Amino acid sequence: MSGHDSKYFSTTKKGEIPELKEELNTQYKDKRKDAVKKVIAAMTVGKDVSSLFTDVVNCMQTENLELKKLVYLYLINYAKSQPDLAILAVNTFVKDSQDPNPLIRALAVRTMGCIRVDKITEYLCDPLQRCLKDDDPYVRKTAAICVAKLHDINAELVEDRGFLESLKDLISDNNPMVVANAVAALAEIQDNSARPIFEITSHTLSKLLTALNECTEWGQVFILDALSRYKAADALEAENIVERVTPRLQHANCAVVLSAVKMILQQMEMITSTDVVRNLCKKMAPPLVTLLSAEPELQYVALRNINLIVQRRPTILAHEIKVFFCKYNDPIYVKMEKLEIMIKLASDRNIDQVLLEFKEYATEVDVDFVRKAVRAIGRCAIKLERAAERCISVLLELIKIKVNYVVQEAIIVIKDIFRRYPNTYESIIATLCESLDTLDEPEAKASMIWIIGEYAERIDNADELLESFLESFPEEPAQVQLQLLTATVKLFLKKPTEGPQQMIQVVLNNATMETDNPDLRDRAYIYWRLLSTDPEAAKDVVLAEKPVISDDSNQLDPSLLDELLANIATLSSVYHKPPETFVTRVKTAAQTTEDDENAEGSEAGYSESSAHTADGAASPPTSASNVPYAGARQPAPAPSTSPPAALVPDLMGDLLGMDNSAMVPVDQPSTPASPPLPVLLPAATGQGLQISAQLTGQDGQIFYSILFENNSQIPLDGFMIQFNKNSFGLAAAGPLQIPQLLPGTSAATLLPMALFQNMSAGPPSSLLQVAVKNNQQPVWYFNDKISMHVFFTEDGRMERGSFLETWRSLPDSNEVSKDFPGITVNGVEATLDQLAASNMFFIAKRKHATQDVFYFSARMPRGITFLTELTTVIGTPGIKCAIKTPNPEMAGLFFEAIETLLKG
Amino acid sequence: MPVAASAVYFLNLRGDVLINRLYRDDVGGNMVDAFRTHIMQTKELGTCPVRQIGGCSFFYMRISNVYIVIVVSSNANVACAFKFVVEAVALFKSYFGGAFDEDAIRNNFVLIYELLDEIMDFGYPQNLSPEILKLYITQEGVRSPFSSKPTDKPVPNATLQVTGAVGWRREGLVYKKNEVFLDIVESVNLLMSSKGNVLRCDVTGKVLMKCFLSGMPDLKLGLNDKIGLEKESQLKSRPAKRLPVAIFMSVSLTWSLNMLLCSGKTIELDDVTFHQCVNLTRFNSEKTVSFVPPDGEFELMKYRITEGVNLPFRVLPTIKELGRTRMEVNVKVKSVFGAKMFALGVVIKIPVPKQTAKTSFQVSSGRAKYNAAIDCIVWKIRKFPGQTEPTMSAEVELISTMTEKKSWTRPPIQMEFQVPMFTASGLRVRFLKVWEKSGYNTVEWVRYITKAGSYEIRC
């Protein structure tokens, strides 16, 4: 029963748009319909068919519903780009909104709401008013959503015309779907405005709960989501609500189940009877478990939510840990989330079973998963005191397998276990030291070094072990250097003998003189001062007893948890972030109220603090030295040679880098200021004079764009320029006009250039030799590369016919081709635009198997023409470029030019 | 906010847009480029189905050779969005008559546009029931069930049905013979340790129903589950109507007689979920499953059981690594269901290391083969009678490699099977009552089948 619409995608060789235009205006209905389908097909693949606007709109007046829908679809896409023409459609819309057929009435209102053009919106109000009171529920349910659309375009209009009241009336409609859509619309309008619009009273609540039974599955989600904001007056009311919502837990649609869970959890906060709460927990467990048999993507959403739920109500799933055991074929994102929940549910009762599972996972293939499993064992050890010993023995077993990353991960968690249970498990240090030389990751190294320093007095060869690390001190990452510094100091304080004393000298020297890391240097100076002024004080500070840690990683702050639980099933609950942190949209009404800002501020506040606590738990070694910091801050020790400038941008880059990777400059046009010119004469060679230059083409004229920067100590004047003979005969077409350059200033100019002045003989080359002189310095010579595309002229555009003719007329010997394996064409439009900007004109495109073949023409002065054929698979690297030209000797230069152009 | 989507994109594996629909103005039309460059072309793909890029979030699912990507910029309901995608795909499949892939999308793009316009409005999912949509969204090839010729005039009361309380069944159906087919399909999920301990085991079952009933019938289903039975004896309902005993041969399976009716055994369901046609409030209070069914085929309910599961098979593997280049694998599979029953299509996949060079085996039943593509010995037994225990013993020679840094991870043995007339949970249909105001007689058919879900035995 499959359709055959793919034929509409095939394109004709001849001018497509004119042909479509003709077909759209034909008198035959069927042909017209086919033409509209072709237009929609073209729109789908991203072609711009907006020029057909009038012709398509003319097809709007039709009895054929299918055709009408296609025209409407076209309008939704292009009305915005042709606002003046869009007015043509208004009459038909208004007429359709009064059609006897309810489907057409609804279609008209639905579509008008999607067109964000003021002129259309003006005319939307009357039909909308009528449709909200329509006899047919299908029209009413569509109109209800349309009010939300209109509010998004023009909130004032909605209020002025009283649509909000009509919408509220629809809550009492006798049709459940109308009710559901009205609730959805009101909830959204409320979300976007500051003043109360949709307040749920106990009366509406009761009415909506009754409607739940008859709604479609989606309607139930709308209603449950809207009602979850309702705060019950007392425990009794809460119990009543919960009782009416619990049947939803049996729904096959997991979105309904999650929204019901959200609502129940909210009301449970009000319920005081422990029996009722226990009973509810018991009721919620099975549906939550059942969510894990849905599609993996839905499982993921469910697991992220369960993670939140068990933090608030650990009893719900306390007996269900087995369902979170990973299946071998679970996708990695499901496995990772299951692991997280297993840790949360691990208890003295089930730990043996859980450990067996973790051990099994630690031998799987996926490295990230294995690491997480190893870490999970450590976190269980920290969480469950009575099971710590068993956890450690499992870790030791894993270390014996000698898989590199398992060992490293195990050492990292064992360090945390030592912090949690001081003076209990040090007997295993000897085993750990065996794997010392396999460590190559900073975190593992740092952890091991911390262990050695912390237990220096118990490890006979602690000094030797540390010394082996010291050799590579300057090359180590900062994390390792800091640990080495602290560990050496600890060693020295514990064993103040000759060996350690020498070591400490080396380390302090390294950490103060040879580094540009301010953290490391500051810490080293503090130790140095402490050690030289009062070794006993140093002991008190450095060897102070450390607070015992607990496993609070991935444990959310209670107020954040509250907020996330109120957002179950939404993105916020998946990201574990409050909505304000990722929703950029601003509310429409006047609401830059301080409330909002405060809320945001506090948000940022605690998310930061939670990050800190997590940090503290994960890297306890640093805290050893955090203590002295505050006290010893007063006099900055010996001003360092140069500020560590390198580090600051680096750090910024890091911080921004994270954001950058998540940021796509799509909304703003990505036209940065013109890129800096390439430096041709560096200041170092030019005695302080720096010259950057590039050939550019502008409005058919060629310029040499030059920037002079005077970094010398003297003013420079009398600049002159000369070009050596070159393949294109480029020469200056006027004098170089550069004023006197004072030290530290710069000047830029556009030097007009002429072609074919003094041509060099021999094979064409892109080399351009330039000489610049001034009154104060010797003559400077430098080389530039001619990029041929600057010569392409605007008269290079060709008709298809003449292109084809020229191509045929040239002998095959004039065809040259070259592959660019590294270049990818991602967006056709963008590439075409880019080439067109350099006067490479797009002629035609055809598809050859999976490849796209594009044809271009370009022309240089003196009528040198290049006909180009580019073959590529969009989105995959590799472009084949074939050209035909009367001047094949220029091909090499042309390829260089096109390569630069395509690389963009 | 229950909004599910601002835009929906259908992309092929290369990232070309096959179809897209923008529902809201808050995401740019070119956001999909960000998806391509930041997810599709990176290792990100497949690591997490929900991703934030810039101010937008992307939810994506792969279905055959198509990526369906939803873009939002608000705090959307993700569960709703994914469920919408799943249901929309089911809807498209029902329209195309089967496959959902790149070709099907290209061939039906006009229809898909029309459906996308109908099933979601401003990001809010609307009615997605194929049954109802087919009343008024018809395309060449997909005719309205009411008439044989294409109609541009929609069915007069279609709009009432879309929005009606019974939004999944149309009125005025007439069948000469009123029949209901019930399929109880169970999947057994098992994870067993190498020592034969059951680590986790559960059954997920489905009750699939095919209805050919006239009018607007009310149905009531009774199962042998504990709560339902208790409630029933409390309510002293009428004695169950005995299902007709009949034998019906189909191509692959035999419709079973409902032999175990009134066998007295009751089972405890951990959880049940129902199709939207089932009255949940009534289920909650009376524990009866009553509903007005959609026409044709649908999934009435799903259930889950963890206690008292009858495992149809036990697998006893012994794998010995003899030195660095040889392995001995012995596997015994024991069928523990009734001797008169049999399993079909049994496949046992026994993993072997990647560097396997040569294998030789002996099987007491079926055929075994080494499949290098999945690094497994695949042992197939087409018909596997109950109460038997065939064995396979294999010798595996390995290429000794220099880079044996990592020992073989021993993935689990996986098993596939189907056992007709058997339910691992012991679930039985006790009765199915049909009431219709015209009072016609119906014939009900029930069959049972148990399949392997993820049936894994570690070794």
Image (tube, rainbow, N blue to C red):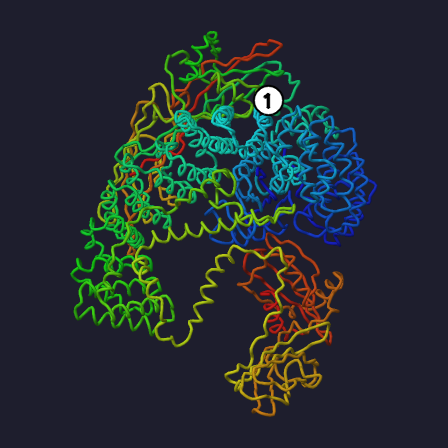
Task: Assign the N terminus of chain B to one quadrant of the image.
Answer: top right
Label tally: 1
Q: Quadrant of residue A636?
A: bottom left
Q: Chain of mark 1?
A: B
Instruction: Tell me where residue A669 appears, x and y as whole percent.
Output: 64, 59
What kind of residue is marked 1?
A: Asp
Residue A571 place in picture, x, y as percent: 52, 43
Screen quadrant of the C terminus of chain B: top left
Which is more toward the observer, A642 or A394? A642
SS at circle 1: loop
Q: Nearer the viewer, residue B165 or A867?
A: B165
Q: In the image, is B193 to the left or to the right of B62?
A: left
Asked whether the viewer can see residue B310, the reply is yes
The residue that appears at 57% across and 83% down in the rendered structure is A710
Q: Quadrant of residue A95?
A: top right
Q: Residues within 10 Å of mark 1 (few under 14, many from 20)?
A: many
Task: Decide if residue A445 is in sight here.
Answer: no
Residue reaching furthest to the right: A27
Name the residue: 70% across, 41% down.
A150
- B380 on left or right of B436: left
Q: Is residue A727 above or below residue B117?
A: below
Q: Is residue A503 left or right of residue B31?
A: left
At a point 49% along the width and 10% down the height, the residue shown is: B244
Quarter-of-image position of residue A680: bottom right
Find residue A469 and report its horizontal and vertical position in percent. Answer: 26, 65
Q: Nearer the viewer, residue B220 or A1?
A: B220
Image coordinates of residue B248 in percent, x first then y, are 49, 16
In this view, the residue in front, A511 or B9, is A511
Q: Which residue is mark 1?
A: B295
